[in-house]
Each structure stands twice: as structure tokens, then as C-alpha cells.
Image: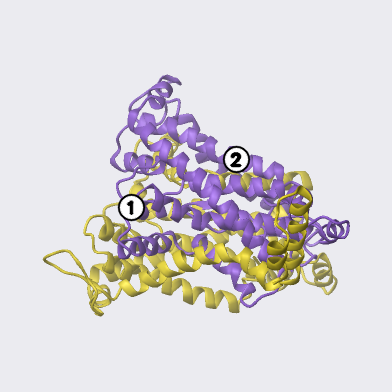
Chain colours: A purple, B yellow
Amino acid sequence: MGTTTRLSRIALALWAALIVLFLLFPIALIALYAFNPSNVQSWPLDGLSTKWFSKAFHDEAMREALWPSLRAAFVSTAIALVLGSLAAFAVHRFRFFGRETVSFVILLPLALPGIITGMALNSFFTFGEVDFSLTTIVIGHATFCIVTVYNNVLARMRRTPTSLVEASMDLGADGWQTFRHVTLPMIATALVAGGLLAFALSFDEVIVTTFTAGAQNTLPLWIFGNIRLGQELPLVNVVVLLVIALTLIPVALAQRLTRDTGALRPIARGRAGAGGGGAAAGPVRGGDAVAEEPPGG
Amino acid sequence: MDGGEGLSAEPASAPGGLRRVRRQVSAGLFRRTWLRATLLLGAPAAWFVLIYLAALVVLFVSAFWRVDEFTGELVHDWTLDNFRTIVEEPTYRTIALRTIGIAAAVTVTDALLALPFAYFAARIAPRRLQSALFVVVLVPLWTSYLVRVYAWRLILAEDGILNWTLGKLGLGSLDVAYSNWAMWIVFSYIWLPFMILPVWLAFERVPASLLEASADLGARGWTSFRRVLLPLVLPGVVAGSIFTFSLTLGDFITPTLVGGAGSDFIGNVVYRSVGIASNVPFAAAFATIPLLVMGLYLLLARRLGAFEAM
């Protein structure tokens, strides 16, 4: 850039280095604490040990919280896959009244502050005299997970030509055959990526869960409770490492799967001119985010 | 309807018949755009209208109800008492102002941290470094929120790594754990990626020719930045601020885990009203404050062009 002096470039590079350090340091540190041999969580650690790992994995309360979390994540992901892709198809293929608001409404549960979505569902279930259980947790999670599938599938469909579908129909395929042999292969990786993101989003959600769980425990609620009360911290340290892995691995996979369409690449090169092909920082809740494609052009 | 008639006229016994039925259904559906659209959109629309939007309506309506003081039952008569309590009780006023104040401070902090970083990442860094920086921003974004707050609780603790480092450097120690300062630091950390990404995108979208023109017309680097670049990336900053502001406004986890005794947020009160006091109407009334603030903020953001920048 001709307009920046050498000195200001160095200053900016230094600033960027500091931000990188700031962003990564806490995560590296918390990974290290999983190997803390002591009961006390102070710095410096007195050595490294894996002695808490087996204790953590055999902890009864932890297991009882982990299992519902996984179940909730799987079921919400399944619901999100169905509803998200249906909505994406409808918005992609048809012009109808209120089409512009679909993307907005689908984004809303994730964009509004977590307590709003949580409180709304809480008063809704209380009003309808529905007992809080894993089912109410799943309803809450599915509602804000739909957007990840919707955005990924829609982004993929916008980038694949409709002429393929037309050609398939011209060649005599019926709707189901076209879907099975043309559309589905086209959107398959976008579906998987959206599903993985939905899973990661659901697996460590805590705010909406608090308001829809009742007496049901989940892993994030177990972690939150223990940190707040300062108990079982050596186990929490280990579980936290597991949680990092269980959310980062699906996201990394999703990133690989959608490298071509860039479902996870908010800043995609060379497409900026093509109707705002770049994307947004995903909205978040409870600290989670989706980096997704916004509706283009 | 064609598809329907096809179904009744050709019993689907033979495979050939089945095929024909399928084709006729396809053709029938193909001609009826509205029917296909309805079939596709029906389920997701029902989910959002019957569950989510209905829930938002119930939230808003129940804010005007009350809980019977003796029986603890929900009473469905209309009253403004919940809102009156929030406005008249100094405690709740303080909590609302603290929440909004810290949300604003976090937003400004993140904008200041993100602007130079995003400028470097978008316009100076070579492409390979850009990809690496992008991953660096995404990793915290996708690392469990709870985990990151916990990490900061350990960092800021009295016997944590921050004070250990300061001690080694001979700078004494800081007493920031469990305070508003801690909340400010942690929130700024947690939401920083949400500010960086839209600002980065905004910097990237500015055509180089504009800056060249500015330089040709005699503007120095700083003048170009202030008069050309900054106005063009402002929508990106506003887009990022929607996230930083909204997310801070609705949080109660960070105040619970790193805030001190007097660090309640709106979310904490809502959480306790639901969980401990079982007063859903009051919680709903208090939760409408972030909703209103965000509504106003979104209107403002739209005027500043933030939605085009997302």
C-alpha cells in the first residue's frame, strides 16, 4: 500500500502480533491446566500430569451430564438439517411474499441476546404448562441451530447453476431422481458442514439451556455450576479440554468440507464484487458463533 | 389437480406405473409453484411462528402479568407493576445502567483493538499470513464460550498468571479479579472476533484506487486513513458493534463467573427471578429492556449502513 509508511507498517504488524497473542493465549493456558497435578488452580503449575483424566472420565455426575448433551446436540442437529434445508430450498427456488424476512427471522434466535431467546421459551413453556426436560432443551437448541444449515445450504445453492437441475428434468428425470442424483450431491458437503456447526453450537450452549432445562443437567451446565461453586476444578479442567476438542474438531471438518464454497470463510477473496459474496461474522450466543455466508446480492 | 388425478387414475402397482405416478406428481408440482413453495416452507415456517415467534409474544405479554404473593401462582391480569418496580427501584436502575454502560465500553474497546488489526490483516499482510490470521481469529470464536471465561477467571485470579508475571517484573500485583474491570476485560476478549471479522471485510472492500486517488491529490497516509478509509469502514465497525453490544447486554455467565459481589447484570436478575424466585413476569419485564435497547440500536445501525456491511 503506497499510502502507509514503513514505520506505520511495523507498528501495525506489532499491534497485530499482540492481538494474536491476546486471542490465543487464554486457550493455550486452559489446555495446559488440564495437566495440572494439584487441587489448587494457581500459577505456576507444580509439574504436569495426566492423573485427573481417568478420574474425570469415570466421574458419575460428569457422565450423567455428558450423555444428555450429546443426545440434545444430535437431535437438534437432525431437526436443524431438515428445517434449515427446506427453508433454504424455498428461499432459493421461489419468489414469495415475505421472502426477504425469512433470513432475518431464522437469524433472530441467534442474533438476539441469549436471555431473550431463553426467557421467551421459558415463559412460553411455563404458559403452555410444558414440563422442562431434554425435549424443551432440544426445541430451544434446534431453533437457533437452523440458521447454520440454512446459511450453508443457501450459499451452496446460490453458487451452483440451476441449469443442472433443468438439464436433469429435460433428460427425463422426475423430481425425486433430480433431487437424489443432482441436487443432493451438490449440497451434500454444505449439509454436513451446516450440521457440524449446528452440533458444535448446541453442544456447548449454556444460556438458552439454563432457561429450558428445568432439573435436566447438561455438560455446560455441569461445568458452569462447578466453576461457580469452585468445586471439582481438576475434573473441570480435563472436561474443558474435551469440550474444546468436541467443538473445534467439527468446525475444522466443516471448514475443510466447504473450502470450495467457503461456508466458513467470512472473508473470501475475489468475490467481494459479486454481490457481497463475503460473509458476516456469525452472530452468536453464549459465545458461540457461526461464520456463515449472508444472503448474497 | 393434475398430480392428484394422476395418482387416482394410475394405481401404483407395476414399477412402470410407479414411475409414471412419480413423474406425474413431479409435473403437477412443477406447474404449481405455490404448492411446492408451501410444502417446502411449511414446516420451518410453522416451527418459527408456532414456537419462536409465539414465545416472543408470550414473553412480551407475560411481562404485564404478575405472580400472586401468597400462592405463587401466575395471575393473568394486566398490570404495569413489573415495569414500575424496574423504573422506581434504584437497585434495578443501577443494574440496567451498569449493563448498558459496560456493553458500550466493551464495544468501544473492541473497535479500537480491531481497527489496526483488521487494517493490517486486510491491506498489508501477505496472502499466506492472511489465511493464518484468519484461523487465529476463528479459533477463539469457536472455542466454547464457557471455557474462555473460565480461562480468564484463572488468569485474573489473585494467584493467577497475571499477578505472577507482574510480580516477576517487579510491578507488584493487580487486584482486578471479581470486579467490573474483570468483566470489561473478559467481555472485550470474548467478543473481539465478532468485531474483527466485519471490520476486516470492510477494509477489504475499499477499492485501492480510492486510496491512490487520495494520495495523488496530496493526502498523507494519516489524512487518507481518516478522511477516506475510516468513513468507508465505519459500517463494518457498526456491524461488529451490533454483536459486541447485544451479546454483552444479554449475558449473565461472565458477570457470575468473573464479576464481583456488586456486578449484577440484567441477565443475573432475570436468571434469579426465574430460577429462585419463580417470578417469570418480572423476569420477562426486565428482559424487555435489552430487547428495547437492541431494537433502538438496530434502527440506528441500519441508518449507518451496517446491514450492507455484514
Disc assigned to residue B192 = none
Q: Is A114 left or right of A199, judged from the image as shown?
A: left
Whole-angstrom CA distance, mark 2 to mark 1, is 29 Å
Picture layout, residue A156 above or below residue B293: above
Q: Is B298 left or right of B257, judged from the image as shown?
A: right
Q: Is A28 left or right of A281, judged from the image as shown?
A: left
Q: Mark 1 points at which residue?
A: A132
- Pinpoint residue B138: horizontal percent, then vertical percent: 61, 47
Nearer to us in this view, B190 or B275: B275
Query: Label 1 marks which chain's residue?
Result: A
Residue B254 in sight in this render: yes
- Pinpoint residue A23: horizontal percent, then vertical percent: 56, 45
Nearer to us in this view, B153 or A120: A120
Q: Mark 2: which amino acid?
A: Pro
- Pinpoint residue B298: horizontal percent, then vertical percent: 53, 73
Nearer to us in this view, B10 or B220: B10
Q: Mark 2 points at which residue?
A: A250
Q: Mark 1: which amino acid?
A: Phe
Q: Tell me which corner region of the image, top left, top right, bottom left or bottom right, holds residue A159.
A: bottom right
Residue at point 61% right, 54% down? A149
Name the element at disc 2.
Answer: helix
Picture layout, residue A86 above or below residue B34: above
Query: Of circles 2 and 1, which is in front?
Result: 1
